[in-house]
């Protein structure tokens, strides 16, 4: 009789745990435990602004001004908002970016904010991919400009976007060029088992009106 009760208790416990695992976000629960969260949430977002400072919000929580290095975040999707600090708040709009971050990775937002909708720079983040037997990683590149040309280590690849380009684990120099826009050059690190997501934003090259008149 005791053995039957013990068996029923064990079976009930297994079923209860299975239901919890199936329905609850276990990753978030583990990541919220105060003792182990620093080891489990080994994830950061670094936010840098060139030529000025910006107020930073992450998932609507204010984090002060740039530069920011926000650590120990659980994996998931984050809303990053940047508002350049200036005397005339209407001159620079608030910019919003959705970033999905992976456990044990570091994401970086490195931008320059111009008036209205103009921004220049890059956003880097990693996503996990199914394990493969080789030592390769993957690279995806998008641009906010049309017909942007992508170069990797000086070699032309194709017109953006590039999706899931398979590369050996290591560091590469990426260059993005588009007619009428400033170039972007950035070093990236491709990691085995990860997809590196690189988003680029380019300033339009200023028009010299005096030269246009002379012509």
Image (cartoon, grey):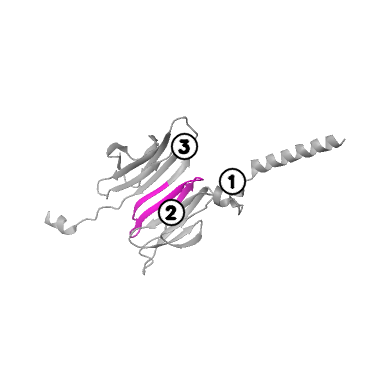
Residue 20 in percent (x, y) is at 67, 43
* Mark 2 residue crowding within 10 angstroms, few (<14) / some (14–19) / many (20+): some
Residue 93 in percent (x, y) is at 39, 60
Mark 2 lies on residue: 46
Q: Earlier in the sequence, mark 2 or mark 1?
A: 1
- Judged from this view, the residue extending furthest toward the bottom is 87
Tally of numbered discs: 3
| Left or right position of 212 against 166 | left
Mark 1 lies on residue: 27
Distance, label 2 to label 1, CA atoms, is: 22 Å
Q: Tag 3's secondary structure?
A: loop
| Left or right position of 185 against 60 | left
Residue visible at 28% across and 52% down?
A: 204
Residue 25 in view in this figure? no
Distance, label 3 to label 1, CA atoms, is: 19 Å
Q: Earlier in the sequence, mark 3 or mark 1?
A: 1
| Left or right position of 74 against 126 | right
Residue visible at 65% across and 42% down?
A: 21
Residue 41 in percent (x, y) is at 54, 49
Q: Earlier in the sequence, mark 2 or mark 3?
A: 2
Tell me the quarter of the image containing the N terminus: top right
- Judged from this view, the residue extending furthest toward the right is 1
Residue 125 in view in this figure? yes
Q: Nearer the viewer, residue 82 or 126?
A: 126
Specify the segment rendered in magenta: 98-124
Mark 3 lies on residue: 193
Residue 194 in percent (x, y) is at 45, 39
Residue visible at 50% across and 49% down?
A: 43
Q: Tag 1's secondary structure?
A: helix
């Amino acid at each position: 009789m005791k053995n039957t009760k013990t068996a029923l208790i064990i079976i009930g416990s297994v079923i209860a745990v299975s239901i919890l695992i199936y329905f609850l976000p276990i990753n978030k629960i583990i990541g919220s435990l105060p003792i182990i969260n620093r080891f489990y949430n080994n994830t950061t977002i670094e936010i840098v602004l060139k030529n000025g400072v910006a107020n930073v919000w992450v998932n609507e929580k204010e984090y002060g001004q740039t530069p920011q290095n926000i650590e120990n975040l659980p994996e998931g999707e984050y809303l990053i908002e940047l508002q350049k600090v200036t005397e005339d708040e209407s001159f620079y709009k608030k910019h919003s970016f959705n970033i999905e971050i992976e456990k044990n990775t570091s994401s970086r937002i490195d931008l320059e904010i111009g008036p209205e909708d103009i921004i220049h720079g890059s956003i880097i983040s990693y996503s996990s991919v199914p394990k493969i037997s080789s030592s390769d990683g993957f690279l995806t590149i998008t641009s906010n400009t049309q017909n942007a040309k992508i170069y990797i280590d000086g070699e032309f690849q194709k017109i953006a976007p590039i999706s899931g380009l398979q590369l050996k684990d290591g560091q590469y120099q990426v260059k993005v060029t588009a007619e009428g826009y400033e170039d972007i050059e950035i070093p990236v690190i491709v990691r085995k088992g990860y997809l590196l997501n690189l988003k680029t934003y380019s300033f339009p090259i200023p028009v010299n009106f005096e030269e246009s008149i002379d012509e």
